[in-house]
Amino acid sequence: MMLCSFCLIILVSQYNVLAGNVYDASTKEPLPMVNIVIVGTEFGTVTDRHGYYSLIVGDTLKQFQVRYSMMGYGYVIKEIKFSEQDYLSIDVAMKMEPLKVQGILVSAKKKKFKSTAFMTPPSLSDKDLMMLPSFVEGDLMRTIETLPGVTKSSDFSTSVSVRGGSPDQNRVLIDDVPLLNPFHLFGLVSAFNSNAIKSAELYSSGIPVRHDASLSSVLDIKTKGVGRDIEGLSGVASLSILSGGLTMGGKISSLNSNFLLSVRRTYADKLLALFGYDLPYYFYDGYLHWETDINDNWSLVLSGYTGEDFLDIRDEDDESIRLIAFDWGNKVLALNLFHSNTDGDLFHIFGGYSNHDFFLRAMDTVFLTDGDIHVGTVGAEYTKNFKRNEITVGVEEYYRPFEYNVNFQMGFKYSYEDIWSNRISMYIEDKFDLSDYLILSGGIAFTHYYSESEEFEQENSDFFRAYRLSAKYFFDDLRAITFSFGNFHQYIVPGGTLINMGIDLPIYYWIPLGGEYDPEEAHHFNLGLEGWLKEDLYFSLEGYYRKYNRLLSMKDMEEIQITTEKTYYETMLEEGSGKAYGFDFLLKKEIGNLRGWLSYSFLRTDVVFGDEAYPTDWDRNHNLHATLLALLGKKYEAGVQFAFCTGNPYTTDLARCRYRKELMPYGEDEATWIELQGDKNQVRYPSYVRLDASLSRSFYFGNNELDVKLSVYNVLDSKNVFMYYYDYDEEPPIKEPFYMLPRIPSIEFIYKF
Amino acid sequence: MKKFIFLFPFFILFFVSCSTSEAPFEHRYVINLVLKPDMKFQRAFVDSTYRLDSSLDSDLTGVSGAEIFIVDEHSDTFRYSESDTLMGLYYSNDSFCVERGMEYLVNVFIEGEIISREVQVPGLLTIFSPGLLDTVYLSAPPLLIWNTCEHCFDNTYLIASYITGEADSADKYAPMLTTDTTLGIFFNRLLYKEKDTMYTISVEAMDSNAYHFGKMWYEYDELKEGEVIGLIGAIAFDTVAVWVRE
C-alpha cells in the first residue's frame, strides 16, 4: 500500500500528496470509511478498510485545514502545511463520541441481514464485553448467557445450553479451529480473555453445512487484530481480582504484518505465598494472532492459543504426598490463508492443530486419569460469486487420535490408547438470490467417518450425509421471514470417570464414537421473523423444533461391565432420543447513549433414555434477560444486566430410609439415613433472579487511557437455589438449600496504550 | 408488535409462577439380607421408607412381623427368627449353613406381600499371600494373591482393608474393585499412615445382586416403580491380618 502511494507520487509529481492512517483512539483499530475533506472545499476522500487514506492536492495549495469525520466519532481538524516536500504523512486518532449516531453499526448488520438466507446470528462485540457487568472479570461465556436461546444449569459453570442441547453439543471455534472444554477454574470462568476477542457470533439456526460436527450450535469467536497500519506498539494491560493480563499488538512494516499477543494468569497463589499462605491452584492462557498481507490478493492469518489449569493439593504432614493433582487445558495453532479478488471471490486454505489434555491423580496412586485428544485439521474452501449466486465448495479433514488411561489403586485400569478416528467432509453450498425479495440457500456435505482400535478389535467405516436449506423472504427493506432446516451429527461425546461419579463439571473427558456407537444425530426446523422496528431497533423472533434421533449418554457406573477395557468401552454409553422446542425473541438497540437488548426464550426439552423420559438439567422454560449499556458523558459508562428465569429441574427426594452399610464382611455394620429419589428432573427449583451492575470511568493520559470498572455480580444477593440437602441434626431432618453465587463485587483496571 | 413486546414480562411472570410442586411420598420395604458362607448365623434387616417431614426415633425403625424363608437346591427350607432386642432384625438358627456355589431362593412375606429373589453364592475364595500375621513393609509391599472364585459375578473382586478391630477405620480405606486375582500396587503411603499397626485385608466375591448394589454404593438411592429397596444377595470372602511397618 505504501509502495502504491510512492508510485502515485512519482506519477503525480506536480501535485502534493497527503496520506496516513485513521484509527480508534481507544482500541487502536483502523477505522474504515472515515470522511476526509479539505475545509471550505468539496474535495476529499475516505479511508479504506485498513483505515488508510491518501489525498492528492494541487501543488499550489500549500496550507489548508483537513476535517476527519465519521459517524459515532468526534471530528478532528488538522492543520496541513506543505513546505519543500510534496508528501505528508498524518496519522489521526479519533475518539468515539456517543452522542453521534453510530450508523455504521446498523449498516453492517443490515448488510448482513440483506445478504444472508438465514436468521442473523446474535453477536457480541469486544465493546459489549468491555461494558457489560463482570463476574470477577469480563467473561465471554457469562455474557453469552444473555442471548436468546441460551440457558444454564447453574452459576458455578460458564458452560451453556443452546436451544435445549447439552453443553457439549456447542461447537466452539476460535479462528476456525475447534476448542474443547474452554473453561478455567472448574468451569467458573471461561478460557477466553476478553481483551483478545474481537467478536463472537452464536449460530443456533441457519448453521452452514460445513459445520456438521455438533448437534446444537456453533460459537464462532474471532480473535482481535490491531491497527494494521499503525506504527508502534499498542495494547491493553489489565488487572482484576482474579488475574493480570497484557495484550499487545503492532505493525511490522518490513513484513507487511501486524500481530496481537495476549497473556493472562491468576496471581492469588503468588500473592498469598508472600504472606506465607499456600494456594495450590492457578491458571494461565495466551493468544497469538498474526496477520500478513502477502500481496494485494493473498493474506495469511496465524492464530495460537494455549491455556492450562493446575491444582496441586499436598498432604500437610508430608508434602511429597500429592492428595489431588489435577490439570487440564488446550493448545491450538491455526493457519489460515486467504485469496480474494475484486469480484468478491474468496479462496481459503486452512490447517490447524489442537490438543486437549486432562490429568487427574488422587492420593498418589488411588486414582489416576490421564488423557489427551489431538485434533489435526486441514481444509480448503472456495467461494465464487456469480450475478445472483454465491457457490461455496470445500473439503476438510479432522484426524483425532485419543489416549485415555484410567488407573485405580490395586491394578484395576482401563485405557484407550490406540483408538483414533478420521473424519473427512466434502461440501457444497449455494446462496441464490431468486429475486429481490427471496434468497435461498442450500448445502450438502458428504462425510466419511473412520474409527479404529486394534485393542478393541473394531474398525468402522461409514458415510454420512448432512443437508441444510434456508430461505429468507423480504417484506421490505426492514423486515423478513426466515426458514431453515437441516440435519446434524456429532462424532465425540463427553464421558469419563467424573461423569461416572456424578460430578457435573464442564471439564469432562471426550469419547470417540466407534464400534456399535453411531454418531449422534439431530434435525433442526426453524421459522422466524426479523428486522427493524425503527432505524436503530432490531428485533428477531424465531420458533424452533429439534428432534434428537440419537443421543448417547454415559451410563451409571453400576450398569457398565468393567471386566476388560473392551467391555468397558462397549457398555459405557446408552442410546437415547429427545426433542426440544420453543421460541427466542430478541429486541436490540445497538446505537445511541442508551443501548442494550432484551431477550426472551421459551424452551421445553424432553429426553428418553431406557424407559425414563425427563426434561434436561438446563430446561429453563422461561428466560428473560435485559441488558442496558449507558454512555454517561465521555468518561463514564454503566452497564446493567437482569435475568429472570424458571428454576432448573431437579430430582426430588420422595422418602428416606436407613442405609445399612457393612463395614466388614463378617457382620459389622452401621446405619445412616439416606434419601430416596423419585423420577428424574420432575420438580423445579424456585425461579432464578439476578441483577448485575457495573460502572466504569475513563482517565485519559495523552493518547493513553485508564478504565476503572466496578462491577457487582448479583447486586440483590438473590438466593438462587443450586441444590437441596438434608440436615439430620434435627428430627425431622431440615431441607436446607445450597445457594448459587452471592453478591460479589469486583474491580478491574484496564490500561490502554 | 410494540404492544406485544410489553406483554412479555407479564407473560413470563404468569408461567414462572406455574412451577411444579413437590412429588408425593413413596412407601417401599427395605430389605438387607446377604448370604455369607462360614457364618454361624445369617442376618437380615427388614425396614421401610419414611417420610422426610415427619419425626422419627431412629432406634425404633424397622419392620416386625415379617416371615423370611430360605429354600436351597434340595428344597430344604430354613426360617429366620425375629430378634427381641432390635426391631427389624431377623436371624437364622444354626441348622442353616450357607454353602459355597449353591443357589438359594429367598422368600420374604411382609403384610401380605411376597418378595422373592434367587441368589447364587460364590465359590471358595482363599487369600494365598501374604500369610496370616506376616509383617509387610510399605517400602516393599508384597503381592496380594488369591484364587479365581467360581460364580463371582463379572470376575470382579472387592478389596478392603482396615485397622484390625476398629470397624470405624474401614471407612477411611476406600474399597477397590479389580478383575485380577493379584494386586500390583497395594500399600499407599497416605492410606497406611498408622505404621506398626495390624491391618485386616479382605477380598470379596459377589453375586450379581451384591455386585450391582456394592459397586458404586449408590443404587440404594433410586426409587423404582414397585421395587423393594435394599440388597438380597450373597458374597464369599476371605481375610488376612498383617503387620504394616514403615
Image (tube, rainbow, N blue to C red):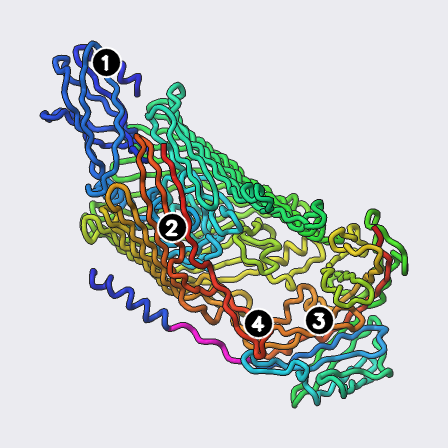
Mark 2 or mark 4: whose residue is earlier in sequence: 2
**Residue identifier under label 4:** A727
- Which residues make up the magenta segment? B18-26
Foreground mark, 3 or 4, reads 4
Give the residue type that dot 2 points to: Ser
The answer for how far apart the CA atoms under marks 2 and 3 are is: 49 Å
Instruction: Using the image, determine if residue A98 lies above or below residue B178.
Output: above
First in sequence: mark 2 or mark 3? Answer: 3
Considering every residue shown, the one lying at the far left of the view is: A40
| CA neighbours of label 4 inside 10 A, class few (<14), some (14 to 19), many (20+) | few
Residue underneath mark 1: A9
**Chain name for mark 1:** A
Is disc 3 in the same subunit as disc 1?
A: yes
Q: Nearer the viewer, mark 2 or mark 1?
A: 2
- Residue A572, by quadrant, is bottom right
Identify the subunit bearing mark 4. Answer: A
Q: Nearer the viewer, residue A432 or A632?
A: A632
Which residue is disc 2 drawn over? A711
Q: Position of residue A196 (x, y in %)?
A: 41, 38
The answer to whether tags 3 and 4 share a subunit is: yes
Residue A440 seen in the current view: yes
- Categorize mark 3 by other alpha carbons within 10 Å: few (<14), some (14-19), many (20+): some
